[in-house]
Image (cartoon, helix red, strand yellow):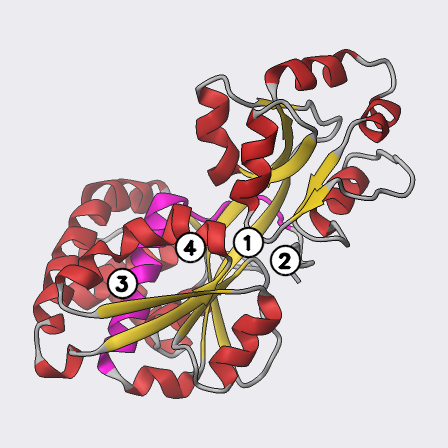
Amino acid sequence: MSLQRLRTFIEVYRQRSISAAARSLDLTQPAVSQHIAGLESSIGRQLFERQVKGVTPTAAADELAADIGDRLDVAEAALSAARARSSDMVGAIQIVGNADFMAEVVTPQLIPLLRSGIRVRLQTGALDLVIHNLVEGHADLGISAFPVNDRRLRTDAFRDEPVMAVAAPEVAARLNAAPDLSAALAQEPVLAYNLEQPLVDTWLRHNGLSTGPISPALSGQDMRALRRLLTEGFGWAILPNYLCQPRIARGELAEIRAPVGPVHYTYHLIWAPTALRHPRVAHARQTLLWSLRATAPLLSAPVLSESPFA
């Protein structure tokens, strides 16, 4: 039972898709299918049921994933660290993405790369800058909450993130008690990612609410600034779970109850195929995909395809 077959199994199990696992592992779909078939033959049990879209794990797959998933990640991280010490890995990589997501989510996952001797340079910017820097070779890897459709680039999903309406507890309590939530929201200052406030509009539309034209009291492309004002008791905003959940747990923020529920967006790692010719970039890409997926696995629930960060 080879390590490669086990890695392929874990990737298919996490992605629920043969084709997505093939892209992530840089293998062909037939190769992934052969690995799974060989593993099923070795253990004498079926691991996946093939569906029209994707695959569904069997009980045997659930058991195997529980037994080896974390251990395999640890073993492969150790092997990656050993490979990273080679001379081919010496140098720096450039990563570009949204400032708050890079700081709150990505940075802690960079420690294995930094310890291996790879230097990391972080750049912040919205989607258009991410695409430009990757295409022009000014960055090696990009991160966005939207799948890029530029044929010159490749993407791989790694995280489904709920976004929700939040405010200071006293503001949220007032809004939650209002007989007409739409009218109540229209009377409170709104803080937004940018002047077009797509996050706000999408959340309102998803929940069947209408407030009329909105002019944000404050807009800014680092949502930690919005969060800071919210904790001071000013206004309401739509924030991703990674930014607001710790503050909700500490009682500094509270969720504004949504009639339908939160909106979900999918985060993607983005790169130009030519960038993977550099071993350190290929190593960094795979290491980040493994670690970022482990912190917040992809969900089976549908997510929105429009970009909140355009």
Numbered tag placed on residue 266 in the rendering? 1
Amino acid on which disc 3 is placed: Thr
Q: Quadrant of the N terminus?
A: bottom left
User: Would residue 45 appear left or right of 240 to someone viewing this image?
Assistant: left
Amino acid on which disc 4 is placed: Met
Reply above or below: 112 against 135.
above
**Label 1, label 4: how many angstroms apart (C-alpha)?**
15 Å
Instruction: Pick whichever, 105 or 276, lies toward us.
Output: 105
Q: Secondary structure at mark 2?
A: loop
**Label 2, label 3: how many angstroms apart (C-alpha)?**
25 Å
| Sequence-wise first label, 2 or 3 | 3
Q: Percent from the top left, x then y, of residue 204? A: 78, 38
Which stretch is magenta? 279-303
Report which residue position mark 2 lands on: 309
**Label 2, label 1: how many angstroms apart (C-alpha)?**
12 Å
Numbered tag placed on residue 287 in the rendering? 3
